[in-house]
Amino acid sequence: MRKLFKSYFSSDFIKNVFTIFTGNVIAQAIPFLVEPVIARIYSPSDFAVLSVYLSVANLFSIIATGRYELAIMLPKDDKKSINLIGVSLIISLIISVLSLLIVLIFNSQICSVLHNDDVSSYLYLVPLSVLSVGWYQTFNYWNSRKKRFRNVAYSKTTQSIVTAGGSIGLGTAGMIPSGLVLSQIGGQFFSFFPLLRSFLKNDRKELKNITKNDMKAVAYEYRDFPRINSLHAFCDVMKQSAEVFLLSFFYLKEKVGLHSRTLRLLFAPSAIIGSAIGQVFYQKASACYQEKGDLQKLVKKVLLSMSFIAVPAYLMVALWGDDLFAWFLGEPWRQAGEFGQLLTPWLCMSFLISPISQIPLIVNKQKIAFGISLIGHTLYLSAIVIGGIFQDIELGFILLSSFQTVYYLFLIGWLIRISKIKND
């Protein structure tokens, strides 16, 4: 990988990518290595509880900051960025309180819609997840702006250690399935501290620049983030949550648990490699656009590099996914590997596009990106519904993979085209 990237990118870019990549490898290796243990402590139905909980929590978490954290990377001066931090933290508190009120009032209705009463008591923990994710994302982007990617890597490693250790420890103690949910929340909460420590150590003096008027000014200047990107992100999560809801409605809980672990493991390469390149790329691309550089050339380089990694990796899953899952997790999980084989084309395309997905934010094409995403979401959920109507989950996944592959091919072409836009 280092030789591959060295052919296309500067040493600074490579260094930053591999800093986050190393952290991601460690962060993902921990849960990956303990997965066989966890899979033998918890059943597929236990993972269904975690999946349903996260589907609810993510509906609030994705808009926890009004998406203003994404704007932290864009201003030329730090004064605007530090006020964006103030805006993001305040909105996180508001959304957290709002989520608590909704859970208190509509708990039973939510469980009824989800067809899963087991998740009822865990829903009261949603506000903590919302606050943790919101504050983590805020300081994550500040550290990325400052090119402190080592701190980002530390935070991800912390999250993995707490989540994996908690899942095993609590599960062994008999807290099933609560161990899965509590360890997930604990990981989210503690991952925030390395980022906060770095901010207080290096940037405490910036706090004096946060004022009410300046926060109002940056909130207005970057108003497209809560108006458009928040809605876009919310619809993305709604798609994921709706998938869980539909699978819960049409099939047994075990199917939901199998599917959630399939995606959990097969999206791991994207979490390790794609997010590492994506986080550095966002900082690099933002600077490139501000300086009127060749953004399209950078996008093409990233796509080419990602393709050299994606094709052989996902080809292995397509050929031997069922046997790999059965060997790694145990025979009861073989069907999860079969699901993975069906979904491989879509997962491969998703991996390719993950680093460059924030191009519309940089070139101010959020409205069009939102419209395109709605088409993708419609195709995605239509495949699940068709499979559910025919009570054939494999048919649903074949259609899902086919629809999403075509959609992502179109999206990649569009992202390459708009990356040619120059900053006025």
Image: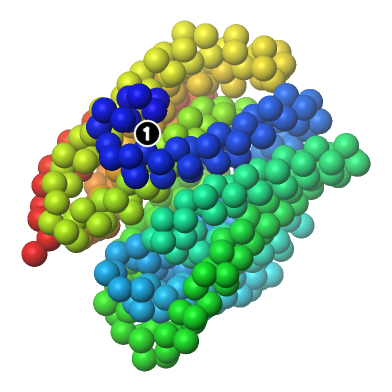
Residue shown at the point (37%, 33%) measured from the top left: 350
| Image quarter in which the N terminus is found | top left
Image quadrant assignment for residue 145: bottom left
Residue topped by disc 1: 350
In this view of the protein, which residue sits in the foreground, 142 or 410? 142
Q: Amino acid at mark 1?
A: Ser
Point 62% across, 17% down: residue: 325
Residue shown at the point (14%, 51%) measured from the top left: 293
Q: Nearer the viewer, residue 263 or 75?
A: 75
Image quadrant occupied by the C terminus: bottom left
User: Which quadrant would residue 195 be assigned to in this image?
Assistant: bottom right
State the residue lying farthest toward the front. Answer: 11
Instruction: Tell me residue 39's x, y (percent).
Output: 73, 28
The quadrant in which residue 311 appears is top left
* Viewer can see residue 354: no
Q: Is residue 203 positioned above or below 215 on the image?
A: above
Q: Can residue 9 be spotted in the picture?
A: yes
Image spot of residue 45 (x, y percent): 72, 34
